[in-house]
Image (cartoon, rainbow, N blue to C red):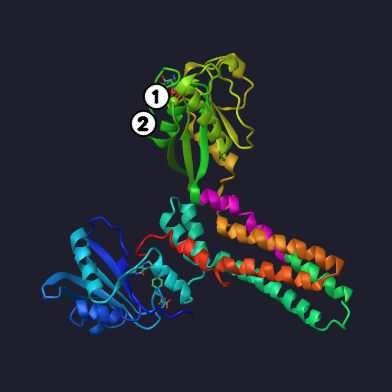
């Protein structure tokens, strides 16, 4: 655990005008800094009790009438002395109060520096620090729940548990390497293998949540595509509940992709409206079509819109292979062409909204978004966790081969150590300075 030497301050609440704003001071001098700015009010305040005070400038003029809360010792969010100042939320007032604190000995905090200190003081592991960012940026209830689960330590605990299982194997194996005169007991070898296999199973379970994690954090990339005039932009507008995209009976209205997010059953969908696909296009339209195909190629879900009032051939499109696609037979209000009779697509009218519930249900099914599928295992790893887990698993795979042949126990032990390090990186147990930099720099200042 590292001791901070300096004292940082920053606005913890949003930058806009508000009734009240929260400024945090953290570090060994937090109380002194606040005392200087508030005529000794911090040291007179009871611990963790909102206390009325006045912040004054160097000449003694009142800058604001505030409430301060003092967190002494290590009992604070950052694990070091903290003073919070709840001042009035005007932009100028908050700026003046913060400037005064800097004058009184605090330094401006960098992005994520409060949370970084909480990490260094052992209040949070890395997955929990990341969870705070997920929580702040969550756009849906499911994402919020996953962030809470992670903040409670779900992923970190699991990574630590898997690491502990491995340590047992490594210790045993290394003891055995140190006493080479003792032959490897085949039973022990099998035991090692069984334990490595069970750790790999645990890793596989966590890895299986990666896709879910990406979707929760970034949303399902849902690309609306089809022939010109099929009603793609109308569908975007219908799902959004607002006239975001231009709709017209002119084929080729949408030239560029348009993105908007909606929440469906707690899951964010990043809807992408695209230029209609047709062969005979030229110029700008052709570029639009190139973009459509690019988007379709990286979609999590395709909504293929077809004009059901026309013969099927008039709305056919060639699209990249997708295992998640929903066909929307649009313009159902115009009456369906006989050719569609056997087709299972979702009947919809963007004009009347009829069929929208069926479409929502079909999307939900295509994505396995039922509560039962997502609700219970709300643990969802992020890409950093995924990379660590993959590295751990590769090392374990190699270790298995080495253990099976029993030829080079030293090398097997080395691989197991490698896997342990990769698991340790998840929670930030092993030395990971550049990882820390990468994570905390993404935070906003004041967090
Ligand atoms: N005013 C205020 N509200 C806030 C925060 C904050 O820093 N200040 N938080 C900041 O993100 C969140 C709450 N998280 C917090 C986490 C730990 C501690 C804390 O004081 N921990 C001590 C005591 C534990 C206890 O009494 O339960 C500790 O861990 O020792 C405070 C807030 C959201 N709301
Ligand atoms: N009757 C009827 N007309 C519709 C329906 N959906 C869309 N339209 C009409 O079809 C025309 C084309 O709609 P758009 O949403 O612009 O079609 P698009 O697929 O985005 O077309 P491009 O952007 O040109 O590729 C417009 O005149 C819409 O009003 C529907 O369900 N019923
Ligand atoms: Mg359009």
- In terms of secondary structure, where does tag 1 sit? loop
User: Does residue 381 appear to the left or right of 95 in the view shown?
Assistant: right
Residue 31: x and y in percent read: 28, 81
Marks 2,1: beta carbons within 8 A? yes
**Residue at the disc numbered 1:** 247
The C terminus - image quarter: bottom left
Could you tell me residue 396's position as x and y percent? 73, 64
- Write down the quadrant of residue 32 in the picture: bottom left
Horizontal side, residue 198 vs residue 438: left or right: right
**Between 23 and 232, the one nearer to me in the picture:** 23
Residue drawn at the location 66% of the way across and 58% of the way down: 390
Q: Residue at x 73, y 68 (%)?
A: 415
> Which residue lies at the image location 61% right of the left edge and 37% below the top edge?
324
- Residue 280: mark: none
Residue 92 shown in magenta:
no
Q: Could you tell me residue 439's position as x and y percent?
A: 48, 62
Vertical relation: 146 (above or below) 195? above
SS state under label 2: loop
Numbered disc total: 2
Against 263, residue 342 (above or below) is above
Segment colored magenta: 199-216
Q: Residues within 10 Å of mark 1 (few under 14, many from 20)?
A: some
Q: Quadrant of residue 338?
A: top right
Where does label 2 land, which residue?
243
- In this view of the protein, can residue 381 be seen by the observer? no
Quick check: 98 left or right of 439?
left
Mark 2 to mark 1 CA distance (whole Å): 8 Å
Mark 2 neighbour density, 10 Å: few (under 14) some (14–19) many (20 or more)? few
| Residue 41: percent from left, percent from top | 21, 81
Identify the residue shown where x is 30% and y is 58%. Answer: 14
């Amino acid at each position: 655990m590292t001791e901070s030497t300096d004292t940082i301050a920053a606005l913890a609440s949003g930058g806009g005008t508000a009734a009240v704003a929260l400024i945090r001071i953290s570090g060994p001098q937090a109380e002194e800094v606040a005392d200087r700015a508030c005529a000794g009010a911090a040291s007179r305040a009871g611990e963790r009790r909102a206390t009325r005070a006045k912040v004054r400038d160097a000449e003694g003029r009142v800058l604001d009438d505030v409430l301060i809360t003092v967190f002494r010792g290590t009992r604070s969010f950052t694990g070091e002395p903290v003073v919070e100042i709840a001042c009035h939320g005007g932009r100028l007032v908050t700026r003046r109060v913060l400037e005064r604190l800097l004058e009184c000995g605090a330094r401006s905090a960098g992005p994520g520096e409060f949370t970084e200190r909480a990490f260094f003081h052992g209040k949070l592991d890395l997955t929990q620090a990341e969870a705070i960012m997920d929580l702040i940026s969550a756009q849906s209830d499911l994402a919020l729940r996953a962030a809470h689960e992670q903040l409670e330590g779900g992923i970190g605990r699991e990574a630590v548990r898997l690491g502990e299982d491995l340590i047992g194997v490594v210790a045993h194996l290394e003891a055995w390497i140190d006493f080479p005169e003792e032959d490897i007991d085949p039973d022990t070898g099998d035991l090692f293998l069984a334990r490595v296999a069970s750790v790999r199973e645990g890793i596989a379970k966590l890895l299986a949540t990666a896709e879910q994690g990406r979707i929760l954090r970034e949303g399902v990339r849902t690309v609306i595509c089809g022939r010109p005039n099929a009603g793609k932009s109308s569908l975007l507008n219908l799902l959004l509940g607002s006239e975001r995209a231009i709709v017209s009976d002119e084929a080729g209205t949408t030239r560029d992709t348009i993105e908007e997010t909606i929440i469906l059953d707690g899951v964010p969908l990043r809807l992408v409206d695209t230029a209609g696909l047709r062969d005979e296009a030229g110029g700008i339209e052709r570029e639009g079509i190139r973009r459509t195909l690019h988007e379709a190629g990286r979609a999590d879900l395709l909504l293929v819109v077809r004009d059901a009032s026309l013969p099927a051939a008039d709305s056919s499109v060639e699209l990249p292979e997708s295992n998640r696609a929903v066909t929307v037979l649009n313009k159902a209000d115009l009456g369906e062409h006989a050719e569609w009779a056997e087709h299972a697509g979702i009947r919809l009218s963007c004009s009347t909204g009829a069929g929208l519930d069926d479409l929502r249900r079909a999307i939900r099914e295509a994505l396995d978004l039922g509560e039962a599928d997502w609700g219970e295992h709300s643990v969802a790893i992020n890409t950093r966790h995924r990379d660590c887990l993959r590295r751990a698993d590769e090392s374990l795979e190699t270790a298995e081969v080495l253990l099976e042949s029993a030829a080079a126990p030293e090398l097997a032990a080395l691989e197991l150590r490698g896997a342990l390090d990769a698991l340790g990186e998840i929670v930030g147990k092993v030395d990971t300075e550049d990882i820390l930099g990468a994570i905390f720099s993404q935070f906003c200042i004041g967090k």
